[in-house]
Structures are given as structure tokens and as C-alpha cells.
Amino acid sequence: MSKKTLPIGIFDSGIGGLTVMQEITRVLPGEDIVYLGDTARVPYGTKSKETVIKYSLENAEFLTSCGIKLLVVACNTASAYALKELSSRVSVPVVGVIEPGASMAVGITRTKKVGVIGTEGTIRSGAYFEAIKKIDSKVVVYLKACPLFVPLAEEGWTDNQVAYLTATAYLESFTEEGIDTLVLGCTHYPLLKRTIKRVLGEDVVLIDSAEATSYEVRRVLTEHKLLRTRSTRGRYKFFVTDSPHRFQYVGARFFNAPIKARLVSIGN
Amino acid sequence: MSKKTLPIGIFDSGIGGLTVMQEITRVLPGEDIVYLGDTARVPYGTKSKETVIKYSLENAEFLTSCGIKLLVVACNTASAYALKELSSRVSVPVVGVIEPGASMAVGITRTKKVGVIGTEGTIRSGAYFEAIKKIDSKVVVYLKACPLFVPLAEEGWTDNQVAYLTATAYLESFTEEGIDTLVLGCTHYPLLKRTIKRVLGEDVVLIDSAEATSYEVRRVLTEHKLLRTRSTRGRYKFFVTDSPHRFQYVGARFFNAPIKARLVSIGN
């Protein structure tokens, strides 16, 4: 069997990575995908580096045991803290969500002022700051943790007054700072795009890491001659570490399609 | 050594149980306490029954290994799902937060209409409904999950417009239903008391399970002749399963005093 026909593996702390998976299925419709949501230990965003690395390695071990050709770390916090460890321990190419989003932001900004929003962990890690500075040290980076955006997205409160006031409180300083590009550094945040645009105005470009990551996945697969080209759509498998019920229910909103997930035990 | 001099053990999924601990220190100032916050796996409120039971048993095992005379399950979700398992497996008396809150609410309501708010897990479990009905089957119970209250309390947004609009969205149906008593069925919620009162008015009595639980702890200790009476204040130890930094920082707001916590590894 050719390695090309193996699935892509994706993991996230829970549901958010489904926005990344959805973009990958759009850009690479022929690929099979195995998705793992670590719903028993979600969220990663408020947890320490050591804990996030440990959980990420366990997730990667499960996915590589399924037989995959490439690993996507579809969680910003895990990408921020664990990408280096994962790349050195996993035998297949590993793609995170931070470098692609940072790279796209640098390519788009004209004012050289870029904002980045994410979980406490992602922002505290400094990973976006470093990734952007590495590409263009002249870009000024403004960082802001937005812890309430994840629960708002999961509650489905993405367009109401609570979401708007929360977004205003978190984002208003960006307007004074004069950013023209904002990286949505958490996979939940694309669900709040409309509200974020209402606060920042139409002139600020929102970078969806999910989209940027899907192009990076295509590039890496092409480079490694692992791209699968066929006319039929790929098959998708979903695994979760806690009861599938909530994942299926909330996840359908993130994936824009019904989901059937299976329970697996990881790390215990 | 007399069993009396052993500490009380308290566990919670994370920080919220500190509101329960604070009440216990107020009612029983001479008792030593060992607190465990399972911050590596927080929150429990969105997780399944099976997962919450597994985590709760592991937490209890750690605390009993420390040598305790009574176990307090200071987490509503864990009390809802795991109290029966804990009581049958642990050799010391076990006190949860649900029965004391339910009992206090039944004693206070005049309209026989009681509201209960909590996490998705606590509400879905039906534990408050059953506990109240068991005491007085004539009481009508209105349940509402309020998933955004925990992140609001942790963000410190307890008195602003976002908190007020969120509380209004969750609680306005209670006014129509005519409740006169509301059980705060999550240990984070006491931080939002003022905002909840603004929405419901001064006539609705808020039942803080933390307070009710501390009286129950005193009752059980007295019954088992385990109450410690001395003039000096007890000593407190805090353990967490993830890096202590965030727990200490956010926890100080919940406990109204500085905290020093130690990292322990549990369940892995």
C-alpha cells in the first residue's frame, strides 16, 4: 500500500480543531482524515506548558498508531507549546497552526502592525510573537488573550450583545494601536468573525489560521509526494476521549455537518 | 494520635471549591484542611458522568492517602455524578455540596418554587431536582445551565455589563416562573451574587451551597465525634494537578487570601 493513501491525522484539545479540519477538507477533498478531540482534558488554553506537552504527545501517539501520513496540530495552545517536541518524536511531517497564520499575516499587513488574539496559554507562550518576528522583525505585534471567546462560541452566543460587548472590551485597544491585520489565534474564534468585524471595522483583515494551515498541509504533502488525487471524497473518522454526545452536538456547528465520534481512552 | 486532629480533605475540579473551603474555615476555624484542585483536567461541568466519576475517585484516593478524617466534594458536578461511588469506596464520611444546598432551599422557600443554576453536567444529572423532591415532593424545581458564569467569574468580570446581560439571558425566565429561592449550584457562582441579585431582585433568596455545606460538615464531624476544638487557627495545604501559577493567581480572588499550592501528579 502506498503511503499516499494513508489518512491525515488531526488532533485538538476538543471541538475547535474542526474548523481546521473543515478547511482541509475544502482544500484537499480527496484526503482521508482521522480526527482526535481530547474532550476529557479540554481546554488546554488555561493549562501549563508541561501539561500541554504531555497531553499532545499522548494524542500524537494515538494518531500515529492509527497509521497516518501527516500530523496536524489543530490547536493553537498545543502548537505554541508542543510543536518542537512533537516534530522530534513523531516520524511523519507535523504541521501546526501558528506558523501558517503568522506567515499569512506578515504577507498581508501594510501598516506593519499586526494584532494576535488567542487563549491565555497561546498568548503567554509568545509563539505568535516569535513566529512573526522571525519572518519580518519590523512588524510590530500586539497580543491579547480573550478567554471568554471560547465559551461564547461553544454556547452559540456569537452574534448577540454579550458577544459584542465582550469583543469590544478585548479588542478596542487594537483600534488605537492602528493594526490592519488580526490573527485569530484560536480555532474557536472564526465563529466570532462577524462580531469581531463589527468591533474593528471592515478595514482590518482577519487571518483565519484554519485556512492558512490547510494551504500549508497541501504544500507539505506535495513536497513529500504524499498528496492524494482522486475524484471521490475522503472518509472521515472522529475519536474523542470523553463521551461523544456533547462533541457531536456542539461539533456539528463547528464542522457544518453531522458528526459521529467514537470514544477512546488516552493517557491513563 | 486522635483521629480528631486529622485534616479535612476537600477536592474540586479546580478553583471554585475555594469558596466552599472559605466557608468551612469560617464555620470551623480550628480545623486543618488539605485542598486538591484538579486543575490539569478542569472543568468537569462539560464532561460525561463516567469521566467525572473516574477523576473523582482518583482525587479521593490522593486525599485519603494524605490521612484525612472527612472528605468534602466541593464541586457540584462531582457531587452530582460521583457522590454514591465515593461514599461506597472511601473509608471516611463524605459530604457533597448538593444535598446541603437542596435542603436549605426547601427550608427557605415560601412559594414552593425553587430555581437551580449550575454547569451543564450538574443540571443534566438531575441531582438537585432529585435531592429537592426527596425532601419535599411538592416543591416545583426550575433548572437552568449557565455555562458562561464560570469563565466570567474566572476572568473577574462579575459586575460589568457583560455579566449583567449574560445573567439576564440565563435568569429572566425565573422571574416569570415566580421562584422565591435560587440555588447557586456551582462553586463559582457566589462571585456573581451581586449581578444575579440585580437581575432577580432582592426578594429572591440566593442559596450559596458553600455556606450550607460548611454547616453540614460541622454536623457530620459532631455526629462522628471528630470535631476539633482549639483556640488556634487551622493550617491549610493546597495541591494542584497543573502548574500552581494560575491557581494561586485566580484562586486568591476566590479564597480572599494569598495561596501557596504544590503540584501533584494524579491519575496518570
Image (cartoon, coloured by chain):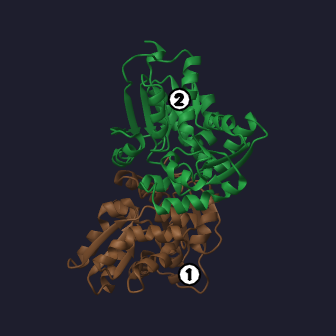
Chain colours: A brown, B green
Estimate the x, y position of residue B234 in percent, counting from the top left.
39, 24
Residue B150's label in the rendered image is none
Q: Is residue B4 visible?
A: yes
Whether residue A3 is situated above or below residue B145 in the rendered picture: below
- SS at mark 1 in the image: loop
Residue A145, compared with residue A214, is above or below; it is: above
Instruction: Give the amino acid at mark 2.
Output: Leu
Establish if A152 lies above or below B153. Answer: below
Residue B72, image x, y percentages: 53, 32
**Residue at screen point 48% across, 34% down:** B23
The residue furthest front is: B202
- Residue B111: x and y in percent read 73, 43
Residue B141: x and y in percent read 72, 46
Q: Examine the rendered structure and indicate whether residue A52 appears above or below residue A130.
A: above
Q: CA distance from mark 2 to mark 1?
A: 54 Å
Report crowding for label 2: few under 14, some 14 to 19, many 20 or more residues within 10 A (C-alpha): many
Q: Chain of mark 1?
A: A
Q: Which residue is mark 2?
A: B71
Kind of element beneath mark 2: strand
Identify the residue at the far right of this view: B138
> Where is residue A115, by image quadrant?
bottom left
Mark 1 lies on residue: A30
| Residue A83 visible in the current orientation | no
Query: Which chain is disc 2 placed on?
Result: B
Marks 2 & 1 on one chain: no
**Viewer-side residue, B133 vs B106:** B106
> Which of these two is toward me, B27 or B241?
B27
